[in-house]
Amino acid sequence: MRGLPSILHRVAHAALGRRLSERLWLFVLVFLAQLRVLLAYLPYQTEVPSGEVLSLVLSQLLRIGGWASLLTLLFALSPWKWLTRTLGLLFSVVVLSLSAYELYLIGLYHVTYNMDLAQIMLSTNWREGSEFVDSITTGQVFDVCCQLLPSVASGFVVRLLTNHTSA
């Protein structure tokens, strides 16, 4: 009877490992989308001394990798196909929307979303908010989409490769 828990443990680890490898595309998508945001914002980091830029970039890469790993792990824990598809769609839409929003803010105002910006946005009324949304041009949307396209394409290629090799 001692061998049964060991076998079940190995089967569970193998199943999680397989699901992780099949869902690696989400890690790639999250990591590259947030890396694009980091690279877009880096030129505006004027308050950081030039000697500390490398440590700032490394700490941000660790943060990005941590979030990408956490979302991928949560995504891989689901053994049900319907939940997997729902989480994959939800995580992808949220990450791409937030990345697009930050790229828009960086391109227009040279800032990322932070507490000060959140307070300003929350203190506006609906008319000011609708004016902000109406001021977004098609060119700006196209520019942001083009910046995120390599992330989406890389995630798609990784998904095709991992699903092909696991089949």
Image: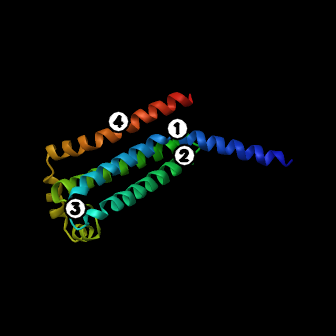
- Marks 3 and 4 sit apart, C-alpha to C-alpha, by 26 Å
| Circle 3: residue type | Val
In contact (CB < 8 Å): disc 3 and disc 4:
no
In contact (CB < 8 Å): disc 2 and disc 1:
yes
Q: Residues within 10 Å of mark 4 (few under 14, many from 20)?
A: some
Disc nearer the start of the sequence (2/3): 2
* Residue at image mark 3: 111
Disc nearer the start of the sequence (2/1): 1
**Along the horizontal axis of the image, is 26 left or right of 139?**
right
Q: Residues within 10 Å of mark 1 (few under 14, many from 20)?
A: many
Q: Position of residue 16 (x, y in %)?
A: 61, 44
- Marks 4 and 2 sit apart, C-alpha to C-alpha, by 21 Å
Q: How many marks are shown on the rendered structure?
A: 4
- Marks 1 and 3 sit apart, C-alpha to C-alpha, by 35 Å
Give SS at disc 4: helix
Q: Position of residue 101 (x, y in %)?
A: 26, 54
- Marks 2 and 3 sit apart, C-alpha to C-alpha, by 33 Å
* Residue at image mark 1: 22
Give SS at disc 3: loop
In contact (CB < 8 Å): disc 1 and disc 4:
no
* Residue at image mark 4: 153
* Residue at image mark 2: 76
Residue at image location 45% in from the left, 31% down from the top: 160
Q: Residue furthest right?
A: 1
Residue at image location 82% in from the left, 45% down from the top: 3
Q: Quadrant of the C terminus?
A: top right
Viewer-nearest residue: 161 or 51: 51
**Along the horizontal axis of the image, is 19 left or right of 95?**
right
| Circle 1: residue type | Glu
